[in-house]
Image: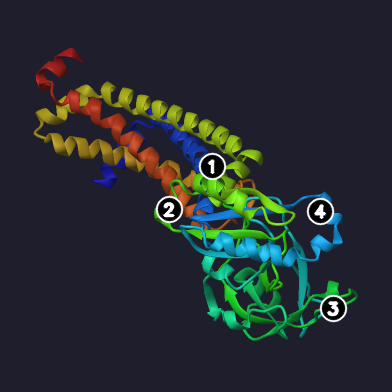
Amino acid sequence: MIKSLLKQIWNQRKSNLWIFIEMMLVIVLLWYGIDIIYNYECSAIKPKGFDTENVFDITVVCEPKAMQDSVMMSHSTEYMDQIYKLIGSFSGVESECYYQGCVPYTNDNMFEGYSPHSDSTHVVDCYIRYVNADYFKVFRLKEIDGKIDESLWKSGEYPLPALMSKTLSDSLFRNKGAVGKTCFNPYYLGSDRPYTNYKVMAVLSEHKLNDYSKYEPFIYLPISSNIKFWNHIAIRVNPDAIPSFKEKFLKEMPAKLAIGPFHLYEINSYEDMKEAYDIEEGTVNYLNSTYAMIGFFIFNVFLGMLGTFWFRTRKRRSEIALRMALGSSKKGIFTYYICESMLLLIIAALPALVISLNIMHSDLTINTLIDISFLRFIICFVSAFALIMLMIILGIFFPAYRAMKIKPAEALHED
């Protein structure tokens, strides 16, 4: 059958040439468009390394004038401790923590560099968060190697315990395993607090700062046992209490949290922070514009391919009638034309594959979030091929179905 189909395609090579060129170009362009979508959406669905669902961020601020009052500020630790306990006791709160450093869905980031004691010249820069032990429960960190021991998570421990993302541990210790190994911060050696010994307690899954970003080297270190007003407070809320939690909190807690010079500044869920951050960074507008352009292109491709094969099949009504007159079944005729078109598509896909591979190897694709890989190429190229295949089937089915309803003698007479 394949030999017969190839012969048929060759006999109609003049009309098939334009279809061949059209399909080849469309496959390449459609692959490129799908590859752009893959770059962003695949990044968005990848886990961040920590769970922000049902988690709220609380910011407490100090009155500027009060900061000049040394007597009042000497009791700031006591005030903040009361505030922290009140927040944790609010109805619906499952657990609470405080931290500083990199704040998700903001541009408030902190960087540091670390070197293994085995090679002081090898410095890896990374993002950092200073957290208390309750942070692990609130953000549900999961170790992939080693074990988090909350009893040892103290800023007074020596060596100071540290948690590293897989990206950082692999870079710092060159994929040789990190748990139990030590490192130091070369930038601290000349400072007033020369911490020179950090011991890796556990390795965490890969981390990123927000949904639309790459995985980055990340480290967690213990924070002071005394909460400060500049620390971010995060709370995990029971799912049943989520619908009206923020409204109730803002109604009941501002007066209670107004202790000493401190007061509640704001409370936001990390979902709201994500939405606001994406809008502020222009991510939403960029993605909407990009997807609208790609969608418009796919729609035009659909109409073009549908029209091409619709007209091509309708033009061959007499051939369909002749095949029916010679005893071919409707199913057999439909299968024949589908196979012929698929074979033509496969032939067109071969040079399209070569062109697409060259585009990928020339680094002309959008790979700002997801690295180029053979798997990524296969997924996007097969998706483009499948979409065009569906368009061709639709373009053949309806005109062929209508042509097969006409009696063979009538169709041949009309021709």
Local SS, label 2: helix
> Which is nearer the N-term, disc 2 or disc 1?
1
Q: State the image coordinates of residue 98 (x, y, percent, origin top left).
A: 64, 64
Q: Is residue 340 visible?
A: yes
Which sits in the foreground, 378 or 330?
378
Mark 4 to mark 2: distance in Å? Answer: 35 Å
Mark 4 to mark 1: distance in Å? Answer: 58 Å
Mark 1 to mark 3: distance in Å? Answer: 51 Å
Q: State the image coordinates of residue 333 (x, y, percent, origin top left).
A: 18, 35
Q: Nearer the viewer, mark 1 or mark 3?
A: 3
Q: Nearer the viewer, mark 4 or mark 2?
A: 4
> Which is nearer the N-term, disc 4 or disc 2?
4
Classify mark 2: residues with Cα within 10 Å, few (<14), some (14-19) or many (20+). Answer: some
Rendered image quadrant of residue 15: top left
275 vs 91, left or right, is right
Q: Nearer the viewer, mark 4 or mark 3?
A: 4
Mark 4 to mark 3: distance in Å? Answer: 32 Å
Q: Nearer the viewer, mark 4 or mark 1?
A: 4
Rendered position, 274 above or below 409? below
> Which is nearer the N-term, disc 1 or disc 3?
1
On residue 241, which mark appears?
Answer: 2
On residue 32, which mark appears?
Answer: 1
Amino acid identity at mark 4: Ala
Rendered position, 127 above or below 265? below
